[in-house]
Image (spheres, rainbow, N blue to C red):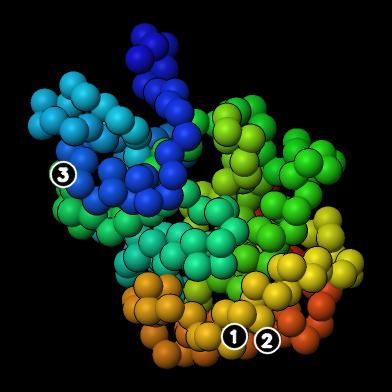
């Protein structure tokens, strides 16, 4: 590990391997991540209790470190897990593997840390057509999950070349609260394969891994948003001009 940076490079990890690491590895807290409103920690994940055999790093968000919000119930970390489960169910690979884990500071979410190009984010990447389809998926994902805080800096370009969406705790509210920077496709047709994936979720019903920690109103609202996407077939417009996060990055 570099003296200048606590972040470790690593090779690619298949989702099932990453989930096993997150579920079973020893967790060593390295320090708190800056600019986070809730307690968010970078951790090493190792195969030995001493922390010598590090196989990956993670982002740990303990429940006890959450700041209460007037408009969201407690337990935002559970929504981090639900967001991964939705991304995984849709087979979109947008949200890094995330699990519920009892860590050094108690129960919380543990997400695989993605080595990424820290100078890049949505607003620097949106004109690169190599990432268009991933961002189109993310746009629909955020509508279905009702993401209330999709800042540009929450969209990472991994060193694996993939787009990853982090900080998904403010999601799945029953009231429509979408705030996002991804408005570039407003009014354009949604690619058919994306529509088909949402249709499949509606036909099968979302799995318990997604809905288990949501209340009935939140699940019903999620399905309503999904139906609206399928019915419209187009990316929505922000007619109010107010559905933007702040700060943007």
Total count of labels: 3
In front of the other: 28 or 56: 56
Vertical arrangement, residue 203 with respect to residue 105, above or below: below
CA gap, disc 3 and disc 2: 41 Å
| Residue 189 location (% of width, % of height) | 87, 70
Quarter of the image that includes the C terminus? top right
In front of the other: 114 or 146: 114
- Element type at marker 2? helix
Position of residue 34 in the picture relative to residue 234 (left or right) = left
Quarter of the image that includes the N terminus? top left
- Element type at marker 1? helix
x 51%, y 85%: residue: 205
| Residue 42 location (% of width, % of height) | 34, 35
Disc ID at residue 227:
2
Q: Nearer the viewer, mark 3 or mark 2?
A: 2
Residue for badge 1: 202
Position of residue 116 in the picture relative to residue 69 (left or right) = right
Residue for badge 3: 104
Q: Does label 1 or label 2 sit earlier along the sequence?
A: 1
x 59%, y 59%: residue: 92
Residue 244 in view here = no
- Element type at marker 3? loop
User: Dot 3, crowdedness within 10 Å: few (<14), some or many (≥20)?
Assistant: few
Vertical arrangement, residue 178 with respect to residue 161, above or below: below
Quadrant of the image occupied by residue 238: bottom right
User: Dot 2, crowdedness within 10 Å: few (<14), some or many (≥20)?
Assistant: some
x 64%, y 76%: residue: 198
In front of the other: 83 or 15: 15
Q: Are marks 1 and 2 in contact (CB under 8 Å)?
A: yes
């Amino acid at each position: 590990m570099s003296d200048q940076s606590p972040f470790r490079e690593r090779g690619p990890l298949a989702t099932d391997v990453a989930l096993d690491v997150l579920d079973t590895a020893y967790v060593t807290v390295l320090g708190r991540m800056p600019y986070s409103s809730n307690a968010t920690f970078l951790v090493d994940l190792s195969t030995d209790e001493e922390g010598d055999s590090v196989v990956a790093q993670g982002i740990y968000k303990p429940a006890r470190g959450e700041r209460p919000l007037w408009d969201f119930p407690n337990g935002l970390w559970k929504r981090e897990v639900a967001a991964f489960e939705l991304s995984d169910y849709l087979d979109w690979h947008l949200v890094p593997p995330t699990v519920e884990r009892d860590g050094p500071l108690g129960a919380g979410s543990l997400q695989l840390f993605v080595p990424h190009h820290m100078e890049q984010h949505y607003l620097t990447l949106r004109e690169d057509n190599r990432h268009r389809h991933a961002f189109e998926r993310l746009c629909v994902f955020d509508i279905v999950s009702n993401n209330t805080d999709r800042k540009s800096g929450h969209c990472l370009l991994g060193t694996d070349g993939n787009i990853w969406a982090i900080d998904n705790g403010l999601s799945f509210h029953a009231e429509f609260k979408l705030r996002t920077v991804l408005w570039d496709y407003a009014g354009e047709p949604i690619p058919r394969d994306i529509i088909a994936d949402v249709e499949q979720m509606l036909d099968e019903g979302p799995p318990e891994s997604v809905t288990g920690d949501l209340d009935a109103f939140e699940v019903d609202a999620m399905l309503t948003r999904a139906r609206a996407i399928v019915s419209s077939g187009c990316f929505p417009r922000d007619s109010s001009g107010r559905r933007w996060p702040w700060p943007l990055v």
